[in-house]
Image (tube, rainbow, N blue to C red):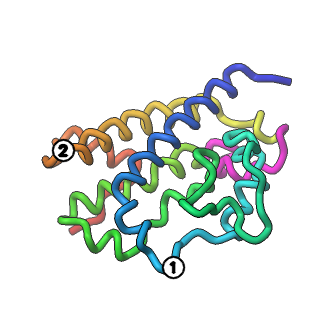
Amino acid sequence: MPDPEFDSSLEDYRSIELGVGRLMQSVCAPFCSVCPTPCCRTAICREAAESPFLVAVHGSRVPFDQKSGYLGATGCKLGAGRPPVCHAFICNRIMSQQPDDERRHALDVLGEVVGYLGKKVWLRRHLVEAMTDADLRRTDLALFRKRLTTASSALGVLESYFSSDRELTPSERAELEQIKKRPEA
């Protein structure tokens, strides 16, 4: 049975994930495009094929390949519906090439946005752990909507920050801290 509120939340999730992907691509492509050992693994892709939530996000428009998963010649074939780890993993090479701690932290937060969205919204567990469509209907929609709002705001901060040569303002830092705390210096 369709659930308009859940479906609307799914669209918002998809939109945020696509935004994260675009921004991640702009920051990481110079490194990933020449990497001799891509981080993508078929075992990780399998989650996108098996999680009812991720299937609902990407809509199964791209077939899962047993050998290469969703990895194509130019990267992941999925625009959205990727496992959160696909966004969260940022290799040491990329991180070490960032100019300062603030930029590294901002990139780390960007990688965590997608994982943050589903965290503890299904029976106090991550939404990708829901194993049936019926499970998905047990999502805490109020918490999910709150996380979508917070993530959308943080993504806006990150888009502005990465498109300019400036420092984050104190209020922007506070917004990003809602996604992931900055490590103590």
**Amino acid type at image mark 2:** Ser
For this orientation, the residue located farthest to the left is: 166
Q: Residues within 10 Å of mark 2 (few under 14, many from 20)?
A: few
**Is residue 122 magenta-colored?**
yes
Residue at 84 percent across and 45 percent down: it is 132
Report which residue position mark 1 lands on: 37
In screen coordinates, is 137 left or right of 1? left
Where are the magenta residues, as a range?
A: 120-134
Residue at 80 percent across and 23 percent down: it is 2
Report which residue position mark 2 lands on: 164
Which picture quadrant has residue 140? Answer: top right
The relative height of residue 183 versus residue 26 in the rendered view (above or below) is below
The relative height of residue 92 versus residue 127 in the rendered view (above or below) is below
Q: Quadrant of the N terminus?
A: top right
Residue at 43 percent across and 66 percent down: it is 33
Q: Which mark is residue 130?
A: none
Choose the circle earlier in sequence order: 2 or 1.
Answer: 1
Main SS, magenta region, reads loop
**Amino acid type at image mark 1:** Thr
Asked whether 59 or 2 is in front, the reply is 59
Which picture quadrant has residue 153? Answer: top left
Residue 150: percent from the left, percent from the top?
Answer: 42, 35
Residue 78: percent from the left, percent from the top?
Answer: 62, 50
Q: How many marks?
A: 2
